[in-house]
Amino acid sequence: MSAVIENHHDDHHHGPAKGLTRWLYTTNHKDIGTLYLWFSFAMFLVGGAMAMIIRAELFQPGMQIVEPEFYNQMITLHGLIMIFGGVMPAFVGLANWLIPMQIGAPDMALPRMNNLSFWILPFAFFILLSSLFMEGGAPNFGWTFYAPLSTEYAPPSTTFFIFSVHIMGASSIMGSINVVVTIMNMRAPGISLMKMPLFVWSWLITAYLLIAVMPVLAGAVTMMLMDIHFGTSFFNAAGGGDPVLFQHIFWFFGHPEVYIMILPAFGIVSHIIETFSRKKLFGHSSMVWAMLSIAILSFVVWAHHMFTVGLPLAAEIFFMWATMLIAVPTGVKVFNWVATMFRGSISFETPMLFAVAFVVLFTIGGLSGLMLAIVPADFQYHDTYFVVAHFHYVLVPGAIFSIMAAVYYWIPKWTGNMYDERLGRLHFWLSFIGVNVTFFPQHFIGLAGMPRRYPDYALQFADWNMVSSVGAFLFGFSQLLFLFIVLKTVMGGKKATGQVWEGAKGLEWSVASPAPYHTFSTPPKVD
Amino acid sequence: MNKGAKKTLTKLIIAVPLMFAFGFALVPLYDIFCEVTGLNGKVSQSEYSDELVTDSGRPIALQFISTNNENMPWTFEPSEQVMKIETGKYHTATFYVKNTTNRKMVAQAVPSVAPSNAAAHLKKLECFCFEQQELMPGEDALLPVKLLVSNDLPSNIKNVILSYTIFDITDYNDEAMAHHDMGME
């Protein structure tokens, strides 16, 4: 994609407002993107601190540090915060920063709703975290909040949890509506759908998924609310309801949610591999079709989370095959990334390191997912650490590595300063080693039969748990280095050029670094 | 905002409540699906039918399991653990219940059939699970279930299990709901 360098429109160019109100009242997509990114970073550290507590307790068998009740609250909040507070807002932040710049639009289509969708998020997480200090403690039923554990046997704070999920849902839905309206209506002339950069494509599909499933999640928690307070029996067998119904509704949301957390990563990694291989991306349109197929298939595989509830054989076979089918478009993507690197003139700057690690480690997570898709094998693996290892491999070196890669890749554009390459690579290697030392051994203890969500375990699992905890501490504390690198880059550093990276293509690299407060007030010309 | 953007926005804003409603629509859809397939032992009452009654049945074992849901203090057990029955004939089995507490209580039994592909062939003419049971303190009763296993039962099934879980639903009565403390104790 070639673009005409944008002219400065000094006649009506104005900078941001001063002081705190700039951030409260801002409708600027770049400001809101920054807010989202910092918020998700804060939540990443909070959820990470909880992970440290979990791994400290699991360092040795027996109960050492926390009470079992508190441990259950930690695993629940760790999951909820990392998913809804860490990964999702980080992707929304990147969408805010990048989508308007990548399609040559001056801002998001609905700037005021954009402000609202961000500013309700801190309240949602304030409510959720405040439940830690309530009588009976925070939610303790795991992030999947299966009924009746989350209804009849739940702590009173569950009501606050339900409202916080409602607010998070409202925020995601508003954010997604904004993304779709922006992409569908504000592309610069000449950018047809199939010419759109892949990050934009990945977010368009993600936004549709979010609009489809977040309301279903809202419905599920509303049913819980009604069961708890208004005497209905959606999930209560005594009143004619069914607990298995909860799992069907939850995973109807939950499985597309899994792809919501990985599709934007696909977009990011495609851009980075293209840039640092100094080649055109292999198979742009097949990437688009692969993402679309993954999104559509995500609606017909939900029951693979429920193989052990007593599904009929026909359903188990259907969901097994449908799940395995997803490996095909995912494989297309992995092969396209490898083909892009093939015979490229590759350099390994920090974003590329994270992106290559993404391809390798996400594939490991994908393959353990295929193992879990096999019904008879799943009966053995279900609710063991093998599952924990699987979804952490797709989420940590998958989604989170892609977010880190994106930050290193675009931070020169955001701040105008280059990050410290030496420290960036150090952060990568510490994270890479840490993540593998943490999660690879969990495959072993899972296959050996260690169940998830217990604060204590049998002695034969002790060695690998200790290894896993050491890795977790390494990974966890390395993220403070990431915080330091980001802060250092914001404060100053080597000035970045407009293009930043030798091989970078796309409209966002055609504007100055740092990107002016207003870009593309008049649409760029694209052939 | 231009016209196209308004149109997209309207469509998306309509989609959100529709998907919210779809979440709730999953509840009856799930029930219908279970009833059609007989999953979850969701067997509804069937009418007496001469067509189902045949002389050429085959012998099978009908096992009964009774479970008390948590905090349900009643005595609840089948009169016989196993009945040797013949397919294509109506049989009556009974369950013994006794309210062991000193207060009036209401109970509801929820059935389940295993294996699940037998459920569709189990025809209940009458069952205590179709209604609620109200027992005075210390009162007991024999609860009947009249059923027929149809001849169409897959031939590999020689053993059908009918299980009931009994729930305390005293607090679910409308009157009692008003005093129910909303689970916020």
Image (cartoon, rainbow, N blue to C red):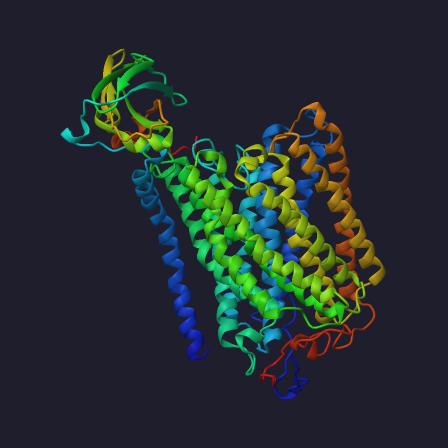
Image quarter in which the C terminus of chain B is found:
top left
For the point 69% across and 56% down, the residue is: A359
Q: Quadrant of residue A522?
A: bottom right
Extreme residue in the bottom direction:
A11
User: Which of the pair A330/A90 is nearer the observer?
Assistant: A330
- The answer to whether residue B78 is left or right of residue A165 is left
Vertical relation: A514 (above or below) A254: below
Residue at 53 percent of width and 57 percent of height: A294
Placement of A135 over or under A102, stated as above or below? above
Q: Residue furthest right?
A: A422
Q: Is residue A225 visible?
A: yes
Tell me which corner region of the image, top left, top right, bottom left or bottom right, holds residue A276: bottom right
| Closer-to-camera residue (A136/A212) | A212
Q: Position of residue B114 (x, y in %)?
A: 37, 27
Whole-percent x and y of residue A480?
Answer: 76, 51
Q: Where does residue A237 sit, x and y in percent of width and height?
A: 36, 32
Q: Can residue A96 be seen in the rendering of this structure? A: no
- Residue B174 position, x and y percent, is 26, 33
As drawn, is B163 to the left or to the right of A307?
left
Left or right relative to A62: residue B103:
left
Task: Give the residue at x 58% y 78%.
Answer: A106
Q: Nearer the viewer, residue A44 or A189?
A: A189
